[in-house]
Image: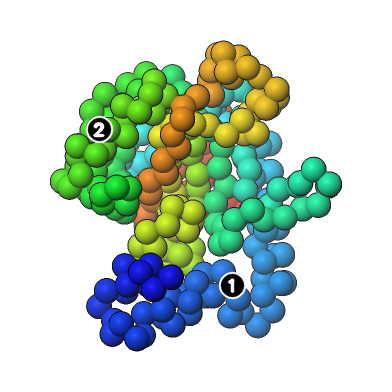
Amino acid sequence: VDSWADKIYPDLPPDKRKTKMWDTIFDICRVKQKDPVSAWQDHIYQLTARSNYLNHKQYNSLKLKAPGTDLMIFLPKGHIWKGGSTTNQNGIDFSPNLPTEEIFTLPHKDKIEGFVAATKPLPVEVVIEDFSLTFSKGRVVKATAKKGENMLNKLLEIDEGSSRLGEIALVPHSSPISRSGILFYNGLIDENGSCHIALGRAYRPCLENGEKMSDEEFMAAGGNVSLSHIDFMIGSGEMNIDGITEDGTTEPIMRNGEWAFDV
C-alpha cells in the first residue's frame, strides 16, 4: 500500500501519502456520502437503466468523435450491454467492481474503422504515453506513442486477437474518478474514470449465447478471442458518441463526455 500511495502522490510528504490515498478511494467509492448504501443503490439503478436502454436500441454501430479520435465501431448482432451489478449462481445480485462507473459491451472484431487517441497513460511494464491507434477491418494497422512505443507494439503482437478490440465501455467524464484527476496505476480503477476500449479478449456474456459458443462460433459471430485484455482510456470532456441504427438513423449517446439520453 505504501508503494502504491508513493506512486499516486509523489509530490506529497511521504507521511501524508497513504492517508490521502485512502481518503480519495473512500471518496470515489461513495463511502463518504451521507448514506453510502442508498447512494450505491441509486447509482446501480442508473447504470442498469442505461444498459437496458442501449440493449433495447441494439445499435448497428457507434461513432466516436473527439480530438485525435474518429472511430466507427460496429456491434455484433445480439450484443449485450452490461454494467453496475451482476447475478451470481445463487441468484444474488452483487457488484464485482468497486468503484464502477461503466456500461460495456463487445465490438465486432472485424468491423472497426478509423483512429483513436488515448487520453490517459497506460501503465504496463512501462508507462505508455500519448499514443494512438489506427484500425482497418478491425485490426490495428498503425500504432504510435511518444513514450513506450516498443511496448505498445509488443502488446499488439501477443497473439492474433491482441491487435483487435474486445470491449467498448462508456463512462461519463463527470465520474468521481475522472474528477479526482488522478492516475491510480490500477486498471480496474482507472478504467472507470473514462470511456475506454480494450485490446484483446471479449467478454462472452456480452453476446447472446456467447458463453455456450466454441471459440470458432464466438469469432464467427464477431467476438474476439485472445489471451490478453488491455483496457486504455479514450474519454474526455470533448468526446461525442452517436449510435447508428440499422436503417442509418443517428442518435446521440454522449455529448461533451456526458450522457445525452435520459433514463
Q: Quadrant of residue 60?
A: top right
Looking at the image, the residue that sits furthest to the front is 2
x and y percent of residue 73 in the render? 44, 30
Q: Is residue 58 left or right of residue 248?
A: right
Residue at 57 percent of width and 34 percent of height: 203
> Which label belongs to residue 153?
2
Label 1 SS: loop
The one nearer the camera, 136 or 60, is: 136
Tell me: residue 61, above or below residue 89.
above
x and y percent of residue 251 in the render? 52, 39
Residue that numbered label 1 is attached to: 30
Q: Quadrant of residue 37?
A: bottom right
x and y percent of residue 14 in the render? 30, 82
Q: Amino acid at mark 1?
A: Arg
Looking at the image, the residue that sits furthest to the left is 146
Q: Earlier in the sequence, mark 1 or mark 2?
A: 1
x and y percent of residue 84 in the render? 64, 53
User: Residue 113, can we see it?
Assistant: no
Tell me: residue 101, above or below residue 155.
below
